[in-house]
Amino acid sequence: MSTSRNGWYSVLFTGLFLFGTAQLTAQAQGLGNSPYSSLGIGEIYGNSNVTNLGMGGMGTAYANSFFLNSVNPALLVRNRYTLFEVGLLGQSKGLTDGRGQKQQDFGANLSYLTFTFPVTRYWSTGIGLRPYSYVDYQTTQYQKVPGTIYESEYIYRGRGGLNKATFTNGFSLTKSLFFGFEAAFLFGNTTKDSDSRLLIGGDDITVKRSTQTSYSDVVWRFGAAWRPKLKNDWFLNIGATIDPMTKLGGNSIDTYQQIDASGTQISNPDTVSTRSGGSVTLPTQFRGGIVLEKSQKLAVGVEFGYQPWSKFSDLEGNSGSLQDSYSIGAGLEYTPKTRSTRYLDLIPYRLGFNYSKLPYSVGGKQPNDVNVSLGVSLPVGQYVNSVSISLIGGQRGTVTNGQIQERYFKIGLGLSLNQPWFQRQKID
């Protein structure tokens, strides 16, 4: 077996790139202030890579053999080369509430780091690391104290999130039937603070209550795909995945302390309560899709997802007022000519749309999330095979029913190395 020298240079180049962005990604787990992340275990990132994001998140049924598909583990076996891929995700967001208050925010984070390779002709495996969820919010409220002329101030803030280390395997059962599974270790912690103080001027004292929660456990995903040939180079792709319901282990500690107007601690943090050996219930998630494909030319399809978040429960057994959620997406990928000598003919172009009913309940209504996306993968030099870029613009929530409207623009950047490593050399 042999490994390309350029391959090792590519890994070194990408590693240096990651080191250079470490300061950026270490500053925040999330993608900017999101009031909705205060609910449940926070905002869920999802499993889409940059190429999937350009197609409305579609990936349950379709995989381009030159790029990693992390949505359906069964499709990992479609990659017949060693693949090293890195993704970054940034988001600019404008928030507006029903009172006309506005805020502009920005956040960026490492989206994923993956390495996969074929073990045999019928089996591919891979490892990866990506964020799973994030908590990132801060809100301030003022209320009049009944029977007085004073106001009270309440500040709520949260930080942290969960990460996911994955071990994925995809198998080719027949020429057109695939099966796979992903075993993942979720780990991380969140901190949620609530500060309250009476605004009487002078020596205002703040009472801070802080809840720190840590999580860790193993979760699973199973996937299957069927790719029958229709005629000539046309294929039908049908795929589905299921994430079984999981009891996610967790521990928490609840403390409070007093702080004076200058920020000096009046008292050391006192423990209100501790909880160990508890669990959070993550509900089952289903996804399915169907795609019509002309090999190495065109792919167009739709995808559906459903997760009964009403079955969620936190460490105290509370549902968090979450509701069942679903999503519908459509996507297209088009490559003019894969064997052309003209650069623009080699670029895969992507277009997508996604509509989601979010699991949050605000004013008795569930916010919607609607977005459109564009994407390309640009062939580049010898150290990185391609640079994938996806642009997503959308809106979720409204300014009515007590909701917060978020208009956002996301940009995903993926670096991909795809080379025939670990293959025996043949002498003619």
Image (spheres, helix red, strand yellow):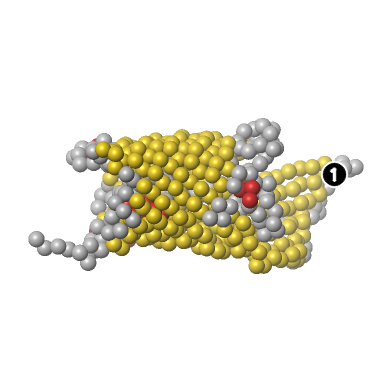
Count the numbered circles shown: 1
Report whether 281 appears left or right of 244: right
In the displayed structure, 36 sits above or below 276; it is: above
Q: Who is closer to the viewer here, 293 or 178? A: 178
Taking depth in this image into account, of 217 and 222 the one nearest to the observer is 222
SS of the residue under disc 1:
loop
From the image, which quarter does the C terminus lie in?
bottom left
The residue lying at 40 percent from left, 37 percent from top is 301
Please rate how many residues cluster around mark 1, counting C-alpha atoms within 10 Å: few if below 14, some from 14 to 19, many from 20. Answer: few
The residue beneath circle 1 is 145
Q: Position of residue 425 (x, y in %)?
A: 17, 63
Identify the residue shown where x is 63% and y is 58%: 280
Residue shown at 46%/50% (left/top)? 241
Is 78 displayed left or right of 161 in the figure? Answer: left
The reply to whether residue 318 is visible in this rendering is yes
Amino acid at circle 1: Val
Please indicate, yes or no, whether residue 15 appears anywhere in the rendered image. no
Outermost residue to the right: 147
Q: Is residue 367 above or below residue 168?
A: above
Which residue is painted at 57% across and 58% down in the image?
246
Q: Position of residue 180 (x, y in %)?
A: 40, 56
Residue 46 place in picture, x, y as percent = 49, 49
Position of residue 415 measured from the top left corner of the image (x, y, whole percent): 35, 51
162 or 5, nearer to the observer:
162
- Quadrant of the image containing the N terminus: bottom left
